[in-house]
Image (cartoon, grey):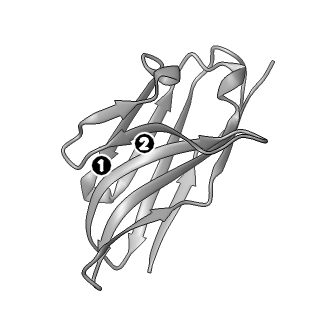
């Protein structure tokens, strides 16, 4: 079994910053891509950013230049640095990871989500 636990969400004023973390634990043999998604009330869950094992990143157009994704492979952790936050960034943020366990097949796992609210 694999668990992904997010932290770092909260309430911030427009223009402010937050840093999200997501740590994976369990019977992990290998982790491939890790990523962040977000879901605002009444909307679908959308991609925010992904990070490959080698550190290559991909971002949604809405967050390019403001958000930075990174990971620490030794700690099975992915981060999302969010700067210049806007009210439209308000959502529940979820991390995911493609994990190979001791069963031998990769599967995608999700965290429980962390609320980010941008408001004055």
Question: Label 2 belongs to which residue?
Answer: 79
**Dot 1, crowdedness within 10 Å: few (<14), some or many (≥20)?**
few
Image quadrant where one finds the C terminus: top right
> Does residue 101 appear to the left or right of 22 in the view shown?
left
**Dot 2, crowdedness within 10 Å: few (<14), some or many (≥20)?**
many
> In this rendering, is residue 88 above or below 19?
above
SS type, badge 1? strand
> Does residue 66 appear to the left or right of 88 in the view shown?
left
Question: Label 1 belongs to which residue?
Answer: 72
In-front residue for pair 6/89: 89
Picture residue at 42% right of the left edge, 16% below the top: 65
Q: Are marks 1 and 2 in contact (CB under 8 Å)?
A: yes
Q: Quadrant of residue 91?
A: top right
Image quadrant where one finds the N terminus: bottom left
Picture residue at 33% right of the left edge, 59% below the top: 76
Earlier-in-chain disc, 1 versus 2: 1
> In this rendering, is residue 31 above or below 80?
below
Picture residue at 52% right of the left edge, 41% below the top: 20
Where residue 6 appears, x then y in whole percent? 55, 54
Q: Quadrant of residue 14?
A: top right
Where residue 45 appears, x then y in whole percent? 61, 45
């Amino acid at each position: 079994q694999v668990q992904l636990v997010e932290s770092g969400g909260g309430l911030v004023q427009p223009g402010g910053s937050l840093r999200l973390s997501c740590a994976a634990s369990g019977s992990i043999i290998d982790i491939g891509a890790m990523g962040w998604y977000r879901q605002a009330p009444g909307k679908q869950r959308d991609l925010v950013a992904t990070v490959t094992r080698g550190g290559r990143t991909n971002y949604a157009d809405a967050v390019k230049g403001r958000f930075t994704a990174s990971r620490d492979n030794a700690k099975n952790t992915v981060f999302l640095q969010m700067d210049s936050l806007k009210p439209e960034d308000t959502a529940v943020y979820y991390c995911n990871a493609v994990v190979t366990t001791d069963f031998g097949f990769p599967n995608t796992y999700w965290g429980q989500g962390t609320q980010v609210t941008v408001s004055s």
